[in-house]
Amino acid sequence: MKKTDEGKIVPLSFNHKNKGDEASRGDRVSLPVSPPGLIQADRTLGYFPTSLKEYYRRALMEYKDVNGIGNQKLRDLIMAPEDTELRDRAKSDGFKGRAANERDSRLTLDDLKKWFGSKSSHHIGDAKFAFINRFAQQVMIEGGFNGFEVRYNKERTNFHRQALRDIFASGYLSEPVAQILDGTPPHTLIHSLTAGFGVPFPTCLIMCGGFYGGIAPLTIVFSDVAAVRKAANTFHDEFFVSLEKGRFPIVLRGYSIVTANEYSGALQGRDLVNARFVLTNEDVHDYGDELFPYSRIIADGRIDVTKDENGSVTAYSMTIDTTEFPPEVSNKVELKKVQRFDGSSFFGASRRLTADLVRSNPYLEAIAEKFSAGYH
């Protein structure tokens, strides 16, 4: 991997349990045993669903074949940050005899052999898979799974769409409401605050893969580049140039699901619908010690759509309750009681953002291409 593509990679580690071996203990940041803010019962489940583990298992088996490496080399690539830290500490503490080939024991060659076994139904536990997930995310950014994605991602996306529809909208969502945005091609919505709001990551890009059956795969990224606007929803070119050149330390992936009708209006073809956002914080670039990677987020929201007389979408926005998002990405908003939206829980949220559809340009296309290999 190129150093410029890696971002800030740190060991995902806790203290070793080897008794009496101070060289292998280290001062390390613990991997959390549960996601933060246990407000939603769903978030007490394991970090990594079995489907994600199986997806990466198949992808990494192909990655080995394409790159001509074995299980030991793959294991060493995955655990390079941990191995390096362990060897450096052993060397500094006088254990020079074994420092050169010391390996962290939390993910071993035997673990990968069992996981990749042709007849194995075994799946690695969450603690071990955390290291694999970190490595796989870096491979994705570099395009290392592109061929795999082409063959498998469409089938998996359709499976997930149907599962989410069954969970969130079955039985009370009319077909016209569900299909309000169906057929829209991939597009980007932007929420961006100008400088002075004191939000570390004031800009949010929602890269939407297009709706089908009222469900769209999303990749949501956050940047520290503040808005430079021409007008309300238009930006100067320098804003997009800075975005494309910068980094996106926080990355959320998942789905937007249309769940119910709020207001179908005859108001110049305007429709408002409730939505649910099901997201995973993949923490592609680790940014400080305060963020908790791999947490799941289920957020309420609203989609506001305006169509012309031919039924073509001329404008739309997504509003998302960001209470469960990392606090660095949203600012508190003034709550205003609006009679029409009573009962929409997101509207009572003290933290939320609204992203508006923007016209595509080469800079946004380059950003979308960089993150297009995401797991949906």
Image (tube, grey):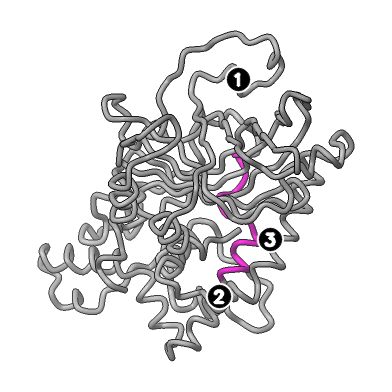
* Residue 65, horizontal then vertical, whole percent: 50, 88
What's the residue type where badge 2 is placed? Ala
Q: Amino acid at mark 3?
A: Thr
| Residue 79 as seen in the image, left or right of residue 190 | left
The residue under label 2 is: 59
SS at circle 3: helix
**Is residue 360 shown to the viewer in this render?**
yes
Label 1 residue SS? helix
- Magenta segment's dominant SS is helix
The total number of labels drawn is: 3
* Residue located 49% across and 78% down the image: 110
Q: Which residue is mark 3?
A: 157
Indicate yes or no whether the magenta region holds residue 74.
no
Q: Which residues are magenta?
A: 43-56
Quadrant containing the N terminus is bottom left
Instruction: Please state which of residues 15 and 329 is positioned toward the viewer in this rendering.
Output: 329
Residue marked by disc 1:
347
Q: Is residue 48 magenta?
A: yes
